[in-house]
């Protein structure tokens, strides 16, 4: 089966797309990744065919202050720009990231079946949940259900406006106004990070997190025999600023941390924070690092949270914008984390001490990670969707 996998350049989307391509490749399929130029060489080094996704840079006609315009109208323009290069691949299936929706539109233009890749929990509205992004648990009792209904009514306006913008964008490129949607939605998360809903879509399948490590390097731990605290600042533009700097200045062995504790900051860039002797900063395999960690401090991005849960490592989450508030509250309710917002040194220290001092957080993280045993296989789901041999 020939597969075109379309994703944007943000690590939270490009890395899962690379991981999915590698799964297709291992199954004997022929995947091609279309993404931003930043990760093309990285994907090629893994033996993947990777080509540039055209149109990612905004033009004078794009209105990035309007989320609907940014997602739908630009996607329609990109679908036209990339239609021929996707057609040249002769794909049997297109997999399109849920944010970079041009892949699905291009597939429709070509008459090729397509599947949506959600690199996080299912974020579609539900009649049984508060609005996604609120961070709220489903309301309990009459007052709770009324609260959720009111909040859903308020957020529904934006959802309906987005649907209208999507229909208009589809018509502009010659597609029917009504969106038929994908054959399947791959929900690349852990069951523990999902919230039960009465209207789970029939086409949505939880397939577990899709992780890719962009390096083979392994960070060496600083000297010491105490707990290992890993700090992973968000790679998203909406992440909380200054997390690494606050952690390096506030977490001091023998003062705010146990004697012999070590701090490791894992980040794509070196940064400019002053590094004390009990800490190290750099790029290394996070899976290897978390296997030796006692606690993770992170921004609440889905990929990092899921990776920590798979390693059975509890967290202190310092969420920024985007979906980080939603993920942070879900993992706190699950029992694996403490939440700190806004970021402040004393609050961070208190949360770190709380998590390190209670085995319950680690036990909850291990329970969450164990849920991966019950998820579907994304390649098999895709094969079944188009009737291809498994």
Image: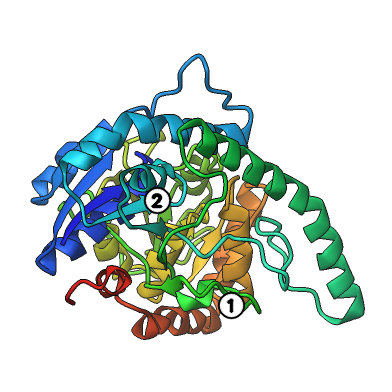
The answer to whether 102 appears left or right of 213 in the picture is right
**Mark 1 surroundings: few (<14), some (14-19) or many (≥20) residues within 10 A:** some
x and y percent of residue 334 in the render? Answer: 58, 77
Q: Position of residue 142 (x, y in %)?
A: 91, 79
Where 217 falls versus 79 (above or below)? Answer: below
* The N terminus sits in image quarter: bottom left
Label of residue 109 in the image: none
Could you tell me how many numbered marks the image carries?
A: 2
User: Is residue 251 something that shows in the picture?
Assistant: yes
Q: Which mark is residue 97?
A: 2
On screen, residue 61 above or below 190: above
Instruction: Indicate the secondary structure of the residue bearing disc 1.
Output: loop
Q: Residue furthest right?
A: 143
Residue denoted by label 1: 335
> Mark 1 to mark 2: distance in Å?
30 Å
Q: Residue at x 52, y 58 (%)?
A: 255
């Amino acid at each position: 089966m020939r597969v075109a996998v379309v994703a944007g350049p943000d690590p939270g989307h490009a890395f899962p797309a690379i991981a999915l391509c590698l799964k297709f490749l291992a199954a004997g399929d022929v995947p091609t990744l279309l993404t931003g130029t930043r990760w093309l060489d990285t994907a090629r080094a893994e033996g993947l065919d990777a080509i540039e996704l055209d149109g990612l840079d905004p033009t004078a006609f794009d209105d990035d202050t309007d989320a609907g315009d940014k997602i739908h109208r630009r996607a329609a323009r990109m679908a036209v720009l990339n239609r021929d290069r996707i057609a040249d691949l002769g794909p049997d299936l297109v997999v399109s990231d849920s944010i970079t929706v041009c892949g699905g539109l291009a597939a429709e233009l070509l008459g090729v079946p397509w599947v949506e890749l959600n690199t996080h929990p299912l974020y579609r509205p539900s009649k049984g949940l508060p609005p996604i992004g609120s961070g709220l648990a489903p309301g309990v009792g009459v007052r709770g259900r009324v609260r959720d209904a009111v909040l859903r009514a308020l957020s529904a306006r934006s959802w309906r406006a987005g649907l209208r913008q999507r229909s208009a964008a589809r018509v502009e490129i010659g597609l029917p106004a009504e969106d038929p949607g994908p054959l399947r939605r791959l929900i690349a998360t852990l069951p523990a990070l999902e919230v039960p809903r009465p209207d789970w879509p029939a086409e949505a399948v939880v397939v577990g997190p899709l992780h890719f490590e962009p390096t083979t390097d392994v960070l060496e731990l600083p000297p010491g025999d105490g707990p290992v605290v890993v700090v992973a600042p968000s790679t998203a533009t909406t992440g909380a600023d200054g997390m690494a700097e606050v952690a390096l200045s506030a977490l001091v062995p023998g003062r705010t941390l146990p004697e012999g504790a070590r701090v490791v900051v894992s980040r794509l860039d070196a940064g400019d924070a002053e590094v004390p002797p009990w800490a190290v900063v750099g790029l290394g395999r996070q899976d290897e690092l978390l296997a030796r960690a006692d606690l993770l401090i992170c921004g609440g991005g889905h990929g990092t949270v899921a990776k920590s849960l798979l390693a059975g490592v509890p967290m202190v989450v310092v969420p920024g914008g985007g979906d980080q508030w939603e993920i942070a509250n879900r993992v706190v309710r699950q029992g694996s984390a403490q939440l700190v917002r806004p970021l402040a040194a004393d609050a961070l220290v208190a949360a770190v001490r709380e998590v390190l001092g209670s085995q319950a957080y680690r036990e909850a993280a291990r329970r969450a990670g164990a849920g991966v045993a019950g998820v579907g296989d994304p390649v098999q789901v895709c094969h079944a969707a188009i009737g291809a041999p498994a």
